[in-house]
């Protein structure tokens, strides 16, 4: 079986993808000197919160995900961000390929809330690989073998890469999913108040809530 290793070397925003997407530069190496005909690769991308330091403001924003900061040594666990995959063409020795990772700006997704917390710095990621490799044996026969489950690579993704994608696809906007009954109540409020947009409806409600807070003794 060919001995494969994986290493993430960089990341960039995919400017013309059909959906928001980051492209990770992946180096794949094999030490046996055989020819790899095809590599059917699957990858799970996880966030590792314990590999980053947090400011007081960041800790406050992350309470919803991880609880109070004093409990963080016990509570933070890896967050699954994405499942992705690709077919790697033939190579011998090593190859450099682009691994696509689709992104979402849905704030009901834990990964989105985590990423959006930060303005600068790096985001700690772990890539877990598996799949199937088709390679040529020393007898020039095509062999098939699974990729061992312990193949992985860590990477510190710059926050700027994430924000570049989100600003490109959703300039000055964000997505929030609501229950249908709550959405209908908001629609009724908007129509009743004669408000033109959803933003105006939310701003009106926030303004009313702020006024109520001021009059509370």
Image: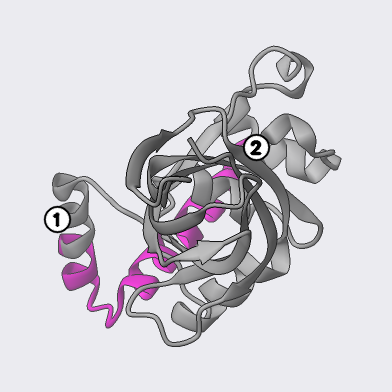
Which residue is nearer to you in this view: 138 or 172? 138
Whether residue 168 is visible, yes or no, is yes
Residue annotated with mark 1:
184
Q: 53 left or right of 31?
A: right
Give the overall secondary structure of the magenta segment.
helix
**Real-space CA distance between mark 1 and mark 2, rounded to the nearest whole angstrom:** 30 Å
User: Across the whole image, how many numbered discs are drawn on residues?
Assistant: 2
Q: Disc 1 on helix, strand or loop?
A: helix
Check the image and report above or below for 75 versus 15. Answer: above
Find residue 161 and report its horizontal and vertical position in percent: 66, 69
Q: 120 left or right of 212?
A: right
Find residue 215 and report its horizontal and vertical position in percent: 59, 45
Q: Disc 2 on helix, strand or loop?
A: loop
Q: Is residue 117 magenta?
A: no
Find residue 110 and report its horizontal and vertical position in percent: 48, 41
Residue annotated with mark 2:
62
Whether residue 124 is visible, yes or no, is no
Which residue is nearer to you in this view: 71 or 141? 141
**Segment tinted magenta in the rendering:** 188-217
């Amino acid at each position: 079986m060919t001995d494969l290793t994986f290493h993430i070397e960089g990341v960039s925003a995919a400017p013309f993808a059909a959906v928001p997407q980051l492209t990770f530069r992946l180096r794949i190496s094999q030490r046996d000197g055989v020819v790899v005909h095809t590599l059917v690769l699957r990858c799970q991308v996880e966030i590792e919160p314990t590999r980053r330091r947090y400011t007081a403001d960041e800790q406050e924003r992350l309470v919803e995900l991880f609880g109070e900061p004093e409990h963080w040594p016990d509570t933070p666990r890896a967050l699954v961000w994405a499942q992705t995959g690709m077919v790697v063409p033939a190579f011998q020795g090593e190859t450099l390929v682009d691994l696509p990772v689709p992104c979402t700006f849905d704030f009901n997704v834990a990964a989105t809330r985590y990423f959006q917390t930060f303005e600068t710095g790096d985001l700690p990621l772990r890539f877990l690989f598996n799949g199937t490799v088709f390679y040529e044996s020393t007898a020039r026969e095509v062999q098939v073998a699974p990729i061992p489950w312990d193949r992985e690579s860590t990477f510190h993704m710059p926050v700027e890469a994430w924000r570049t994608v989100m600003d490109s696809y959703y300039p000055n906007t964000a997505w929030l999913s609501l229950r249908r009954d709550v959405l209908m109540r908001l629609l009724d409020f908007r129509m009743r108040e004669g408000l033109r947009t959803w933003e105006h409806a939310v701003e009106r409600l926030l303004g009313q809530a702020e006024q109520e807070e001021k009059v509370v003794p």
